[in-house]
Image: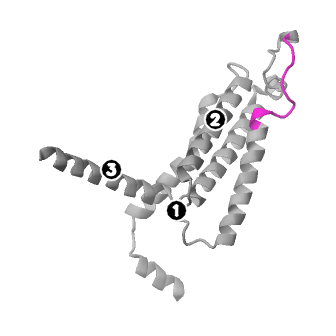
Amino acid sequence: MKNNNIQADDSNIISKIGKNINRWFIQDSTGIDSSFKNNMLVVATLIVAATFQTGINPPGGVWQDNEDGHEAGKAIFASSHKHLQYFPYNLFLILNTLAFSMSTQIILMLVYHDRLYFEIVVATLSMVATYGTAVWSLSPEKDVKFRYVCVAALFPYLWRLSYQTFKTYWHPFPVSTIKNETTK
């Protein structure tokens, strides 16, 4: 008999965790106009495609040989600005990764209640892992501040968590007071 109660308690805890994740991370997209949702999906998908392609094939291409101190298969863009200590390449990677990550988050948020959501999540995570692996393998060793690229990849999700937590738990004024003040 105790095992049944433990299972019921576990499912209750899991249910509470799921509801909190839903409230914190996911904006409910069921109330969004379908044409707006479709337009946003197209735009986000185009951004994901462009940033993915740019991440795996960086501007300038990659070195084809190991001559002149360059390593074959590494981004030319990173080694062509050594006098700036790779700042342009690092900035490019950070901004490209931020756009890629933000767009994948938008896609996941917009398709949350749709069929095949689990499959979309698995495909998206696989694509994100492929992007990260490609960026890591194309970047010259010791040149890229990989931790900054990781922060850029996590930023949209941390931002959403912060925003939803702030919106959920911190209300300095009752919402009705704010609405009354804005209508005057």
Label 1 and label 3: CA atoms lie apart by 20 Å
Question: Residue 27, which numbered label?
Answer: 1
- Of tags 1 and 3, which is closer to the observer? 3
Q: Answer left or right for 117 relative to 75.
A: left
Q: Earlier in the sequence, mark 2 or mark 3?
A: 3
Q: Is residue 58 magenta?
A: yes
Outermost residue on the left side: it is 1
Please rate how many residues cluster around mark 2, counting C-alpha atoms within 10 Å: few if below 14, some from 14 to 19, many from 20.
many
The magenta segment is: 55-66
Is residue 40 placed above or below 104 in the rendered structure?
below
Colouring convention used in this rendered image of the protein: one colour
Q: Earlier in the sequence, mark 1 or mark 3?
A: 3
Is residue 3 placed above or below 74 in the rendered structure?
below
Residue identified by numbered label 2: 149
Name the residue located 81 percent from the left edge and 16 percent from the top edge: 72
- Of tags 2 and 3, which is closer to the observer? 3
Please rate how many residues cluster around mark 3, counting C-alpha atoms within 10 Å: few if below 14, some from 14 to 19, many from 20.
few
Identity, as a three-letter code, of the amino acid under mark 2? Val
Identity, as a three-letter code, of the amino acid under mark 3? Ile
Name the residue located 61 percent from the left edge and 44 percent from the top edge: 124
Outermost residue on the bottom side: it is 184
In the structure shown, which secondary structural element does the residue marked by tag 2 occupy? Answer: helix
Residue 95, position as x, y percentages in the image:
71, 43
Question: Residue 14, which numbered label?
Answer: 3
